[in-house]
Image: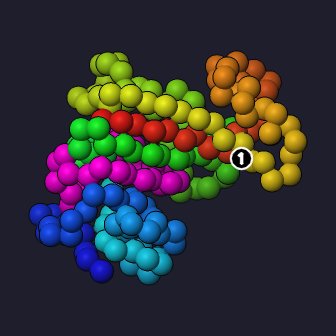
Amino acid sequence: MSTCEPNRAAQGMGIRKVNLGSGGQPLPGYVNVDVNVNAAGVDLVCDLNQYPWPFGSDSIDDVRMDHVLEHLQDRNRAVAEIHRILKTGGIARIRVPHFTWQYAYTDPTHRHFFGYYTFQYYARDCGYFDFQFSSCSVRLTFGKRRALWNRLLEPIANRFPTAYEQSPLRVFPALAVEATLRK
């Protein structure tokens, strides 16, 4: 296990794919990064609130971040760091809770809330950021375990996201926003 130290942590590890904030869910074939030294399968212990992250610019092909971005102090800085470390053509897959999900607000460690269009700001020239991803695709996901209406609503909400987010249909909460950003 390596410790996150600038200019040293990722040197010589041949890192091409990173799972940022892996927690107890490491991904095979990825360098699993987490702040918790005791988390299962962690390869690199690193506080993602500390910048810059210990990866070279344009050095990573694939970034995964599953229910982590909402916990970080500055989500825009974190997304800028993802852009910095990704190679041209590299992909970041990010999943965060949708603002309609009850636990988005219940968890006191959540600092940010996300809607369908949040990630599209990072892939257009909106004037807010000094970086821009070349493309962004977004999908809302609903819990399908018990509710038939979630199976019916998910394709409608993804086809008409504005109508979903701005109408009483929000009484059927989306669980997550899944974004794929390409540099």
Residue 102 in the image: x percent, y percent?
A: 71, 46
Say if residue 77 shows up in the picture.
no
Residue situated in front as seen by the camera: 84 or 137? 137
Q: Residue at x 43, y 77 (%)?
A: 41
Residue situated in front as seen by the camera: 100 or 59? 59
- Relative to 113, 130 lies left or right: left
Vertical placement of residue 123 versus 112, above or below? above
Say if residue 67 shows up in the picture.
yes
Q: Residue at x 19, y 46 (%)?
A: 58
- 65 part of magenta stretch: yes
Q: Which residues are magenta?
A: 52-79
- 70 part of magenta stretch: yes
Residue situated in front as seen by the camera: 166 or 89? 89
Q: Residue at x 21, y 65 (%)?
A: 14
Q: Where is mark 1, residue-wise?
A: 102
Residue 48 in the image: x percent, y percent?
A: 33, 58
Residue 46 in the image: x percent, y percent?
A: 31, 67
Q: Residue furthest left?
A: 7
